[in-house]
Image (spheres, helix red, strand yellow):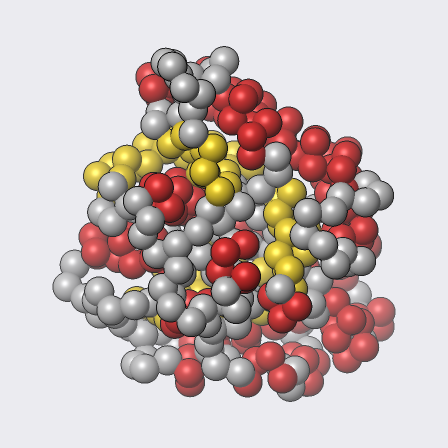
Amino acid sequence: MSGTSLDGIDVALIETDGETIASLGPGRTYVYAPETRELLFQALVDARELTDRDARPGILARAERLSTERHGQALAAFLKEFPAYREVDVIGYHGQTVLHRPEVGLTVQLGDGPALARATRAMTTGRGPTLVYDMRAADVAAGGQGAPLVPVYHRALARGLGPPKPLLVLNLGGVANVTYVDGMVDPIACDTGPANALIDDFLKARTDLDFDDEGIIAAHGTVDEAVVDRLMTHPFFHRPPPKSLDRNDFRAWVNEHAGLDSMNTANGVATLTALSAACVGAVLPHLPKRPTRLVAAGGGAHNATLLRFLRARLGIEVATADDVGWSTDALEAQAFGFLSVRALKGLPLSFPSTTGVPVPMTGGVIVPPPAA
């Protein structure tokens, strides 16, 4: 899994039948080199002009080749460290999202599935694993948002937390998405708004830092609550789930309404961090019941200031995935392993209550191992 934060590739092992979780294995993150990250940021710019999800004009073709190579290298490093897992049966490959415009039927994840499948054969035993990729396209083609896809995995994880209680699972990547789980009914989910992307981009423009490590910069700043209130008037925040976002959807809105140029760096970071928390709070009125706990995962779950802002704005218990025995960093990668098995079995990856798709929808492109 490589998410909208563009920070690296997560690899994780999971043993599952696509409905229950037998065990969770190790997870590792392989950080992008600066030149790789820069190329992917350039690809985001070129992708804005796409009208065909299969087209790769400009820098996009080079970015797809490089991204696929980096995923192969990450997998090779993982299997070198954990050689016992070379007998893996299935690989779920998310790819790198560079454009998400479900309203016009477009979602684009860079990644050459067949090329990665070929590369895995030298790393694995026997004929090699089945590879599943491009898991969002079928949902979007059917009229869904194509995101978030992880809620069905969140529901499976929540089974291990004891008697069912209304629970929120929050992924804090470049964009934040949340899942409402209450027993075994279909989960409710949506993207909530920006999480790390606006903060990271602001810091990159002001400093030589890629992100606010542990929220230290935000902790030394002062939130401009009037700016947060102004930004929260965006129509997106008043729409009920399901709904989804592109990484850059709020860039122009923030540039127009936040007045960041007049803020010092710490105050700007603090205000954007508060915005990320406020976005999550805006979802609560749209849920069937008030959740009793929020479990946060993803890179933003390491941001202590963001977690503090979430507790203050939501007024409920906020824990990290690590706190409840899950994995803060590997959860998304685990989810796409889980989803790949569901895809092989024809089980739904998305639901009307998670992406707005008309009926529960499976998906994914399957690359089987070569015939014996």
User: Which residue does the image show at 30% across and 81% down from the upper left?
Assistant: 289
Between 105 and 36, the one lying in front of the other is 105
Q: Is residue 5 visible?
A: no
Q: Where is residue 65 in the image (x, y as percent from the top left)?
A: 70, 31
Furthest-front residue in this view: 371
Quarter where residue 173 is shown: bottom right
Quarter where residue 6 is shown: top right
Asked if residue 135 is positioned above or below residue 192 in the image, the reply reads above
Furthest-left residue in this view: 163
User: Which residue does the image show at 60% across and 79% down from the upper left?
Assistant: 236
User: Which residue does the image show at 35% across and 41% down from the upper left?
Assistant: 344
Q: Where is residue 184 in the image (x, y as percent from the top left)?
A: 22, 65
Asked if residue 269 is positioned above or below residue 320 in the image, the reply reads below
Side of 211 relative to 290 (left or right): right
Q: Quadrant of the C terminus?
A: top left
Asked if residue 153 is positioned above or below residue 125 in the image, the reply reads below
Q: Can residue 96 be seen in this view?
A: yes
Q: Position of residue 67 (x, y in %)?
A: 66, 34
User: Which residue does the image show at 62% across and 47% down from the upper left?
Assistant: 109
Side of 220 relative to 150 (left or right): right
Asked if residue 300 is positioned above or below residue 179 in the image, the reply reads above
